[in-house]
Image: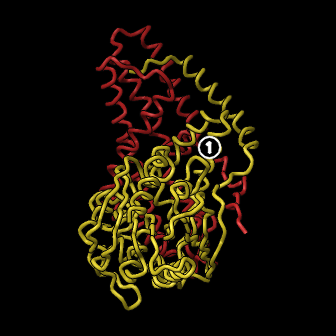
């Protein structure tokens, strides 16, 4: 049962306490935590948004630019976290010309921003900037998580401007039985929330994410940290991830209202009932090639929520890429670096 | 001009996050050490060792459970259970409801009392899941014993405790009742915040 003696436990406690004391010193010596490693330059700015171009890593990058649209709820440097964990670097190495939308940090002045602003105005302007810059009619678009849902909406509304669409860990059907986020938000009065708070604090969203697995994410993780206190590199990696987890921008109130109600609570995207401005989003309008990338162990966006796209988009060139891992591992795990960017690049270069 | 992504500030990480959990872990270790001490004594004096084991494990469970019932009994041990309660309280604070700064005018309102009741229901659900986790842990230990395996380190025992809590918590989280309660909790808090008394 428990093959432990009191002396063994006392010794283990003492060793743990010793490492804990030393760890405080190590933490003080870690220095700056850098997030993002690839060289880039801003090429367009509008309100809080910045559009970046990453410096190509091949002499003649692919002629059609790839625009990455990340989620609103976390910061996009997860795509370029560190030297050996960078999806963006993998895409650059594969010969793509990569651009990224950084949404910035909405403040009180942004509370009235709606999905019209995000889907039509912001993404639309970024797409137009790249079409002009590269002299092409249509660009390649890669939407990540919530950014994938926004990208689907944009593509459905402006199909002529997008040549190929990649969705990555993107929810499409928000009412699959295993969707825990929908389960948590189902009975929250979203109107009361937004009317009361204006913008939705990032800390509140952190609570929702932590609450999915609190004993691991808020307890065990920090006990285990003591084991790597004497490994400066491992500690830096941990702190980099920790910074990303808690670097949660507030959400523009009106955009959150519509996303939470229409997508999470009423599942309108899959029903073809989302209205952006005065236009209905019909995913069947998406007839261009689509690559849908999902993670088999994703606890935030279950595979079934992503795979629903197969049934509701209009593309005859629809493919899926299944990654064996979770919602975070698909960006940062070693296997993801080997598998995902090359597969995306190969799919794009073949079209 | 090409530029590097800006570096973050080194002070972003809150070391207290580690220290709090480390102290809770050490308190857990202390309890287990006491348990094994008593078990060792029982092994020397009693003939029915299996019965002694069960009896002492029940005592261990009771001690740990007491910390959930009343955190004042052993605050560090209680922290093991109070992860979600603490996180919720911090969230409520960011929304403008810090319990210690609530004005009396708000405390006397029905919306505040309704929030307190709902928060009580929420904490009760968390505690129930935690109690079930202890039963599950006992069951898992018995299964290990039946299979001729033993837990050979404190960390292994702690990890088992975490696994059991995640399992019972996860079952609670996925229930329709929890979904309803979670919504009720947020809505009750927001109704407090939306009252003018909360701003004073």
Q: Which of A223 and A113 is in front in this view?
A: A113
Residue A156 image-quadrant placement: bottom left
Q: Is residue A251 left or right of residue A312?
A: right
Q: Whole-percent x and y of residue B111?
A: 47, 74
Indicate the quadrant where residue B143 lies: top left
Residue B132 in sight in this render: yes
The quadrant of the picture occupied by the C terminus of chain A is bottom left
The single residue placed furthest to the front in the displayed view is A60
Q: Is residue A89 above or below residue B51?
A: below
Q: Name the residue under label 1.
A: B18
Q: Which residue is drawn at 45% across and 64% down?
A: A144
Residue A197 vs residue A41, the one in the foreground: A41
In the rendering, what colour is chain B?
Answer: red
Q: In the rendered picture, chain A carries what hue?
A: yellow
Residue B147: give x, y in percent of width and height: 30, 20
Q: Residue at x 62, y 29 (%)?
A: A16
The figure's colour scheme reads by chain
Q: Tell which of B43 and A61 is nearer to you.
A: A61
Q: Position of residue B37 (x, y in %)?
A: 51, 18
The chain letter for the residue carrying disc 1 is B
Q: Is mark 1 on a helix, strand or loop?
A: helix
In this view, B9 is above or below A193:
above
The picture quadrant where one finds residue B89 is: bottom right
Observer able to see residue B107: no
């Amino acid at each position: 049962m428990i093959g432990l003696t009191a002396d063994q436990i006392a010794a283990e406690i003492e060793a743990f306490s010793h490492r804990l004391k030393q760890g405080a010193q190590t933490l003080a010596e870690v220095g700056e935590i850098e997030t993002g490693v690839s060289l880039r330059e801003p090429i367009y700015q509008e309100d809080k948004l910045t559009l970046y171009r990453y410096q190509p890593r091949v002499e003649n990058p692919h002629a059609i630019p790839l625009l990455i649209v990340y989620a609103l709820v976390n910061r996009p440097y997860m795509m370029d976290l560190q030297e050996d964990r960078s999806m963006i670097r993998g895409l650059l190495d594969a010969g793509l010309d990569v651009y990224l939308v950084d949404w910035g940090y909405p403040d009180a002045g942004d509370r009235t921003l709606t999905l019209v602003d995000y889907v039509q105005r912001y993404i639309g302007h970024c797409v137009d900037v790249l079409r002009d810059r590269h002299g092409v009619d249509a660009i390649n678009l890669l939407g990540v998580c919530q950014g994938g849902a926004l990208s689907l909406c944009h593509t459905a509304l402006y199909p002529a401007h997008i040549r190929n669409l990649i969705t990555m860990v993107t929810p499409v059907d928000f009412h699959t039985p295993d969707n825990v986020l929908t389960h948590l938000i189902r009975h929250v009065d979203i109107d009361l929330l937004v009317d009361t708070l204006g913008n939705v604090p990032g800390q509140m969203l952190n609570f929702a994410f932590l609450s999915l697995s609190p004993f691991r994410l808020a307890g065990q993780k920090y006990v285990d940290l003591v084991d790597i206190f004497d490994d400066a590199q491992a500690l830096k990696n941990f702190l980099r991830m920790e910074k990303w987890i808690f670097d949660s921008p507030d959400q523009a109130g009106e955009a959150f209202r519509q996303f939470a109600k229409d997508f999470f609570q009423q599942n309108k995207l899959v029903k073809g009932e989302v209205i952006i401005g005065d236009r209905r989003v019909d995913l069947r309008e998406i007839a261009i090639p689509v690559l849908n990338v999902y993670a088999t162990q994703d606890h935030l966006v279950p595979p079934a929520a992503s795979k629903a796209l197969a049934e509701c988009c209009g593309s005859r060139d629809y493919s899926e890429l299944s990654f064996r891992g979770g919602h975070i591992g698909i960006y940062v795990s070693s296997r993801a670096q080997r598998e995902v960017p090359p597969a995306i690049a190969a799919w794009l270069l073949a079209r | 001009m090409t530029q590097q992504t800006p570096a973050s500030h080194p002070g972003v990480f809150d070391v207290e996050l580690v220290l709090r959990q480390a102290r809770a872990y050490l308190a857990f270790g202390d309890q287990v050490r006491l348990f094994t001490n008593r078990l060792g004594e029982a092994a020397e004096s009693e003939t029915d060792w299996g019965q002694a084991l069960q009896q002492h494990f029940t005592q261990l469970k009771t001690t740990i459970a007491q910390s959930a019932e009343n955190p004042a009994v052993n605050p560090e041990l209680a922290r093991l259970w109070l992860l979600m309660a603490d996180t919720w309280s911090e969230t409520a604070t960011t929304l403008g409801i810090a319990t210690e700064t609530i004005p009396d005018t708000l405390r006397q309102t029905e919306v505040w009392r309704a929030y307190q009741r709902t928060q009580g229901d929420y904490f009760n659900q968390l505690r129930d899941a935690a109690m079930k986790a202890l039963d599950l842990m006992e069951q898992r230990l018995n299964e290990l014993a039946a299979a001729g395996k033993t837990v050979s380190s404190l960390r292994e025992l702690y990890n088992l405790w975490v696994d059991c809590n995640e399992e019972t918590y996860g079952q609670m989280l996925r229930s329709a009742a929890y979904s309803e309660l979670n919504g009720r909790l947020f809505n009750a808090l927001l109704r407090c915040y939306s009252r003018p008394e909360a701003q004073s």
